[in-house]
Amino acid sequence: MKMFYSASSPFVRKVMIVAHELGLADRIETLPSAAGPVERNATIREHNPIGQVPTFIADDGLVLYDSRVICEYLDALGHGSFFGSGPARWRNLTDAALGDGLMGAALLARYEVALRPEPLRWPDWVGGQLAKVTDAVDRMEISDLDGRVDIGTVSFACGLGYLDFRYADLDWRAGHPKTAAWFATFGERPSMQATMPPG
């Protein structure tokens, strides 16, 4: 199995955490890439017209994207239970959507500041995206997270980890003691340690 990869992508991290938890990480060859929102990687686009990471190539040549689909494939391959069944499945999927939404909003705010020329930056856009981040963390604070290792909690952890990586001055822990305590414990998992972003 192969995957176009960026160590700084929270969506790639989500896939790799699931792979580590299922004992599949060593079977995935990571392919370095220079995927970006403006200049898209031509090699990735041969497999995924959106040109984003993660893009995954299974041993039989099946190409999968995005992270939600890849995680479900790995869960089936590894006979896992990250998605659950019955009511737990809908909870897990909804929490995963919230975590993905946090990551997406944080990435859009990051692109606005890091990639857009300064005279063209729109502060209200950044503020609007970071407000989504704050609302997502507010919802996590009232969620039942203890003891769970599923696609929802992995997505939450990747989102919070991305905030620590790119928004250290945001101080999301302030006012969210329950989430902060949960993340401190969840962050000690070997899968989380193995997938820390660079720096």
Image (cartoon, rainbow, N blue to C red):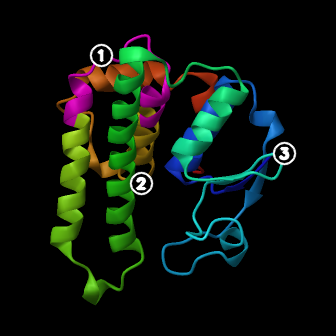
**Image point (48%, 73%), residue name:** 37
Going by the picture, which residue comes out furthest to the bottom? 119
Image quadrant in which the N terminus is located: top right
Q: Which residue is mark 3?
A: 59
**Image point (20%, 22%), residue name:** 142
Single out the mark in the foreground, 3 or 2: 3
Give the SS element for disc 2.
helix
Q: Give coordinates of residue 88: x percent, y percent.
A: 39, 17
Q: Which residues are magenta?
A: 138-155
* Residue 144 is one of the magenta-drawn residues: yes
Q: Give coordinates of residue 147: x percent, y percent.
A: 43, 10
Give the SS element for disc 3.
loop
**Image point (84%, 45%), residue name:** 59
How far apart marks 3 and 1 lie (CA) works out to: 37 Å
Q: Is residue 134 left or right of residue 13?
A: left
The dot on residue 144 is 1
Amino acid of disc 1: Asp
Mark sitting earlier along the chain (3/1): 3
The dot on residue 188 is none
How far apart marks 3 and 2 lie (CA) works out to: 34 Å
Mark sitting earlier along the chain (3/2): 3
How far apart marks 2 and 1 lie (CA) works out to: 26 Å
Number of labels in the image equals: 3
Residue 96, by quadrant, is top left
Residue 19 shows in this picture: yes
Single out the mark in the foreground, 2 or 1: 1
Q: Which residue is mark 2?
A: 166
Amino acid of disc 3: Asp
Going by the picture, which residue comes out furthest to the top? 147
**Image point (57%, 51%), residue name:** 199
Looking at the picture, tell me which residue is in the foreground, 146 or 24: 24
